[in-house]
Image: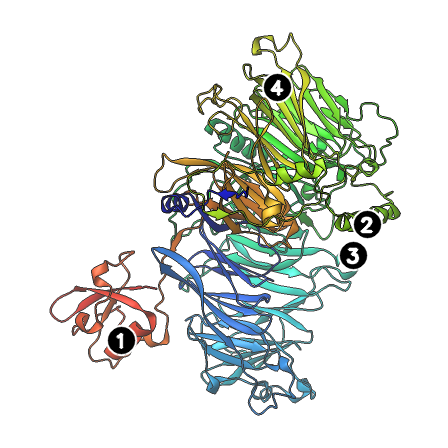
């Protein structure tokens, strides 16, 4: 008789609608510090900041939660960026010499960042393009005119080009070549040499028609654009690095390659050729490195600020990355742990202001952003509400907890505030942004992300919204007695040293002892107890306290080898003084906590154990080593690994796979019939049997003597039926790399008898998966197929009690398949062979509760898994029916796949770089994304100039409302125009120019009548 197996996956329109309401994949926001930053820009009017990266990304930040991200089509480094102040426009320059204009526009009620124009500077006329050097028109510096209608482009060939904004149109008739400038230079200074590339361009603070041009050779020219003549020449004898104006326009400061800077007076009666009034090398007299950038800022309370980067003594401190602040006799050298990219000051930019009065200094370095308060004595740092460097020490693990109770949340915040007392009373410069608004809904739940680091720290992050905010830092290094010092070297400084270095920033990637690294974290959000496990087999159980206290730490040693002979640990030594020390001191590979039973379980590459931290005694120790697991005794830090042994094992695997491939299956053997029957195991047929089973791939069973087969991959506590179907009780489950699952029944006394009786463990079940695939996760499902609640959730009425009447089941997820077994009989109920069907292996899994976007009361529990190919699959529980499949991470991104963590409500995080988490959502309802609005005024085009001869005019009033009614948006301009006359202080323009502006700016106009001959117009740019 012929047998056919059908699957119940026919097209069901009702089910498809439910799936649309439950599942939707979106990459929502990137948390952390941008990887490999290359440029910085700041808009003083809108108070927004932009960071460009080497990968071509542009990220704009405003108030917390207000973020915009754009990516150039070309994967090239963003070398420069410049805001058009107040317009929401950004001009960027890539290292391939292309210019790009970005605009923040409105769409569907929210603001978005989009590239609108791009431009490449053509070659110089009259030159043979094929033979001339391509760098002659390479842009070296950009200056935006204060009116934001023209961009000046300085090039390597010494020419200056004029680009009209915002259309990026070249004004060829205004191009200023070096030959024209050389005509004004004295003959003895020229000496037949070129002036070199244009290094700096600065607009005169009082006369926009004049620009200060700095050439690499050292010559500076104050050029009058209206007369096309050089007004002043500044003859420098050192290679020029940067220029800056003093606010009044009477002083110029220049920095040079010899580590010095010069001050040049500029007055109305000054001669054409000028010499510096003062020239100094701050860190001389020995040779110094170049001062890359210098800023002169005036202050109404005293001496001006002189801020510059670089200039360190070449021999002694040439490897330091520094920014110097000098005011009068006060000098501070800010010492960073990574290269300085750029900096800017937050100060007065209004023309009518007499002084700059800088309030803050913002420094972008390769690995972090540091803000210095210039108003508070001592110039302390201002903590940033976002952009914190996640990788201040390399991230080794991560852990997410949803729905944090308010009490614990407030205690963590309070502990963080006590840990880092605020020295500055001023907020982050971009924190207050009047033109920006956060339009997304406030988070409905408090999410906590914990990251473990290489230096032994655990950092707490507020992951509730768009901004990942640092809350608290837990250090474990000071618990251990090691040879290295754990003092915070970033805060150490000596007043007698010169230069007066001050360590700033928190990026410190170097770990003195690799044994301190954090491998696994577990936290109970109801009791504030946390387990931290590390690289040297140390397991710490801690509880959050409201006050500091000193107490003796009790140490317990758990021998996981159980006196097995023939095994000698060749790895690192154990760390002294820990709560639980696994022996051998191998890295902890799995950990779990059950605070209601006062138990913690831990596993390494040698076995697993259970520890009662209330009575402080070991409950269980089980060795999982295979006799051939000698590789597990060497440890990740051992230097005695045999290359010969590794090659021998590789060749054995190759030979084994070839031999197994040549073998023919004997269909008459009993084992082959069992395997065939196992391969044909399927779900019970249903009424919608329409699809045939896909072809399954052949999976080779793994050898029992593979190296590291004893590694414990997962641990799990559950209250379920293990001994019989009538009595449930505490159990502990462990899964290993060889496909073995151990289930122990635990005798846990009642809370009243915790101090009288000890916890006991008895082996109840042992399961061996057929292909010996590593066990990734274990979860027990109640009689309704729902995952069991967390400890204390039921007793505190925070979750429904599990169904203890129906039969429980256990879901075991291996790298190759998912399988559900009934309890307590442990018989196979259903399974899905992912590797056989999809050709991939499971890397991360998580049980997720998906709530419908259409109905808040409808939800489904599903299993989400990430594979080695970087795709995500979602299955129903306990039926294991495939629901959706998404491509999430590139399969080449191994570190990203390894770092992925799922949340319990359909979101996830993974590292896209050492310093950034990518946040994604699988849920239609639960999405965290930056939804924000930017209100800009873009009336800065050249057509908006006042015309004194304009007959009929329009009076333009400032924008009064944030939005325009829908019925007023598409009204023709002719219907809105009436004759009017100009009033004092109002902007007027001709009718023709007004129409041109409307068509080019897409501006929506409404009007308010003011008498019979005049009307006011409210304008707003729409996109």
Picture coordinates of residue 987, whole percent (x, y):
27, 70
Q: Which of disc 4 and disc 1 is earlier in sequence?
A: 4
Mark 3 or 1 closer to N-term? 3
Q: Is residue 329 above or below residue 289?
A: above
Specify the quadrant that holds the C terminus: bottom left
What residue occupies the far front of the structure in this picture? 1
Residue 607 visible somewhere in the drawing: yes
Tag 2 near tag 1, CB within 8 Å:
no
Tag 3 secondary structure: helix
Return the residue at label 3: 316
Q: Nearer the viewer, mark 4 or mark 2?
A: 2
Distance CA(mark 2)–CA(mark 1) = 80 Å
Query: Counting residues from the N terminus, which is met first, the one under dot 2 or under dot 1?
Result: 2
Q: Which mark is residue 655?
A: 2
Q: Earlier in the sequence, mark 3 or mark 2?
A: 3
| Crowding at mark 4 (Cα within 10 Å: few <14, some 14-19, many 20+) | some
From the viewer's perspective, is the residue at label 3 or at label 1 nearer? 1
Marks 4 and 2, Cα distance to the nearest angstrom?
Answer: 49 Å
Which element carries disc 1, helix, strand or loop?
A: helix
Query: Nearer the observer, disc 3 or disc 4?
Result: 4
Secondary element at image label 4:
loop
Q: Residues within 10 Å of mark 3 (few under 14, many from 20)?
A: few
User: Distance from label 3 to label 2 (Cα)?
Assistant: 58 Å
Which one is in front, 917 or 662?
A: 662
Counting residues from the start of the chain, the first of labels 4 and 2 encountered is 4
- Residue ID for mark 4: 598
| Disc 1 target residue | 995
On the image, the x and y values in percent for residue 28 come to 48, 50
């Amino acid at each position: 008789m012929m047998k056919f197996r059908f699957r119940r996956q026919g097209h069901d329109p009702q089910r498809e609608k439910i799936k649309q309401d439950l599942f939707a994949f979106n990459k929502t926001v990137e948390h952390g510090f941008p990887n490999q930053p290359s440029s910085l820009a700041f808009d003083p009017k809108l108070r927004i900041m932009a960071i460009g990266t080497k990968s071509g990304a542009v990220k704009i930040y405003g108030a917390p939660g207000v973020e915009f991200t754009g990516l150039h089509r070309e994967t090239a480094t963003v070398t420069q960026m410049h805001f058009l102040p107040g317009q929401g426009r950004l001009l960027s320059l890539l290292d391939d010499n292309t210019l790009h204009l970005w605009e923040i526009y409105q769409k569907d009620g929210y603001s978005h960042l989009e590239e609108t124009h791009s431009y490449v500077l053509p070659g110089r006329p009259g030159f043979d393009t094929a033979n001339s050097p391509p760098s002659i028109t390479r842009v070296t510096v950009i200056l935006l005119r204060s009116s934001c209608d023209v961009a000046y482009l300085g090039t390597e060939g010494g020419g200056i080009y004029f680009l009209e904004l915002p259309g990026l149109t070249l004004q060829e008739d205004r191009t200023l070549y070096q030959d024209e400038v050389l005509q004004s230079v004295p003959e003895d200074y020229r000496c037949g040499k070129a002036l070199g590339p244009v290094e700096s361009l600065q607009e005169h603070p009082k006369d926009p028609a004049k620009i200060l041009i700095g050439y690499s050779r050292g010559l500076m020219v104050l050029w009058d654009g209206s007369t096309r003549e050089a007004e002043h020449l500044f003859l420098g004898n050192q290679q020029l690095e940067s220029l800056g104006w003093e606010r009044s326009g009477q002083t110029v400061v220049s920095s040079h390659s010899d580590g010095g800077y010069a001050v040049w007076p500029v007055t109305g009666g000054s001669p054409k050729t000028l010499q510096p009034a003062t020239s100094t090398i701050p860190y001389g007299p020995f040779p110094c490195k170049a001062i890359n950038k210098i800023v002169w800022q005036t202050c109404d309370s005293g001496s001006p600020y002189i801020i510059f980067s670089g200039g360190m003594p070449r021999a002694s401190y040439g490897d330091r990355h520094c920014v110097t602040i000098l005011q009068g006799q006060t000098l501070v050298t800010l010492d960073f742990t990574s290269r300085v990219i750029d900096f800017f000051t937050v100060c007065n930019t209004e023309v009518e202001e007499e002084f700059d009065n800088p309030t803050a200094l913002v420094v972008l370095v390769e690995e972090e952003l540091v803000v210095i308060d210039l108003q508070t004595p001592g110039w302390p740092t201002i903590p940033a509400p976002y952009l914190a460097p996640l990788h201040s020490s390399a991230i080794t693990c991560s852990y997410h907890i949803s729905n944090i109770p308010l009490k614990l949340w407030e205690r963590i915040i309070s502990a963080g505030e006590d840990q880092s007392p605020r020295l500055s009373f001023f907020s982050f410069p971009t924190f207050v942004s009047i033109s920006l608004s956060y339009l997304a809904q406030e988070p409905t739940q408090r999410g906590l992300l914990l990251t473990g680091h290489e230096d032994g720290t655990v950092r707490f992050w507020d992951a509730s919204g768009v901004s990942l905010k640092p809350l608290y830092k837990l250090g474990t290094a000071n618990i251990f007695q090691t040879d290295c010092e754990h003092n915070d070297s970033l805060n150490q400084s000596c007043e007698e040293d010169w230069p007066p270095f001050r360590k700033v920033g928190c990026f410190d990637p170097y770990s003195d002892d690799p044994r301190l690294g954090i491998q696994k974290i577990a936290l109970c959000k109801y009791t504030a107890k946390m387990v931290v496990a590390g690289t040297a087999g140390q397991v710490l159980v801690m509880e959050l306290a409201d006050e500091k206290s000193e107490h003796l730490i009790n140490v317990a040693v758990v021998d996981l080898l159980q006196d097995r002979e023939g095994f000698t640990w060749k790895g690192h030594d154990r760390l002294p003084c820990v709560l639980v020390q696994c022996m051998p001191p191998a890295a902890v590979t799995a950990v779990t906590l059950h605070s209601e039973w006062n138990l913690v379980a831990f596993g390494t590459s040698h076995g697993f154990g259970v520890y009662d931290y209330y009575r402080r005694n070991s409950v269980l120790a089980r060795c999982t080593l295979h006799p051939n697991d000698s590789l597990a005794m060497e440890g990740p830090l051992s230097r005695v690994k045999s290359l010969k042994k590794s090659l021998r094992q590789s060749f054995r695997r190759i030979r084994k796979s070839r031999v197994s491939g040549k073998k023919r299956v004997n269909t008459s053997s009993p084992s082959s019939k069992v395997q065939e029957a196992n391969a044909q195991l399927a779900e019970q047929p249903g009424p919608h049997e329409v699809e045939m089973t896909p072809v399954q791939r052949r999976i080779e069973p793994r050898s029992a003597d593979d190296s590291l087969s004893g590694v414990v991959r997962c641990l799990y506590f559950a209250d379920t039926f293990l001994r019989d179907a009538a009595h449930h009780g505490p159990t502990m489950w462990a899964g290993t790399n060889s496909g073995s699952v151990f289930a122990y029944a635990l005798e846990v006394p009642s809370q009243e008898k915790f101090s009288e009786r000890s916890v006991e463990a008895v082996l109840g079940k042992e399961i061996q998966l057929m292909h010996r695939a590593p066990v990734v996760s274990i979860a027990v499902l109640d009689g309704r197929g729902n995952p069991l609640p967390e400890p204390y959730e039921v007793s505190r009425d925070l979750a429904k009690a599990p169904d203890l009447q129906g039969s429980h089941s256990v879901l075991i997820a291996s790298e190759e398949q998912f399988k559900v077994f009934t309890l307590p009989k442990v018989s196979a109920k259903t399974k899905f062979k992912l590797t056989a069907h999809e050709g991939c292996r499971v890397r991360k899994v998580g049980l997720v509760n998906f709530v419908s976007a259409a109905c808040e009361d409808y939800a489904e529990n599903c299993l989400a898994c990430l594979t080695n190919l970087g795709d995500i699959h979602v299955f129903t529980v306990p039926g294991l029916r495939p629901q959706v499949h998404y491509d999430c991470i590139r399969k080449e991104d191994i570190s990203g796949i390894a770092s992925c963590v799922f949340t319990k409500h359909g979101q996830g995080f993974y590292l896209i770089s050492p310093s950034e988490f990518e946040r994604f959502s699988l849920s239609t309802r639960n999405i965290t994304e930056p939804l924000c609005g930017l209100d800009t005024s873009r009336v800065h085009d050249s057509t908006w100039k006042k015309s004194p001869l304009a007959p009929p005019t329009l009076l333009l009033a400032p924008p009064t409302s944030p939005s325009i009614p829908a019925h007023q948006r598409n009204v023709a301009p002719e219907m809105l125009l009436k004759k009017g006359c100009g009033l004092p202080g109002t902007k007027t323009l001709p009718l023709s120019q007004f129409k041109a502006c409307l068509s080019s700016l897409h501006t929506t106009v409404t009007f308010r009548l003011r008498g019979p001959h005049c009307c006011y117009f409210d304008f707003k740019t729409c996109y």
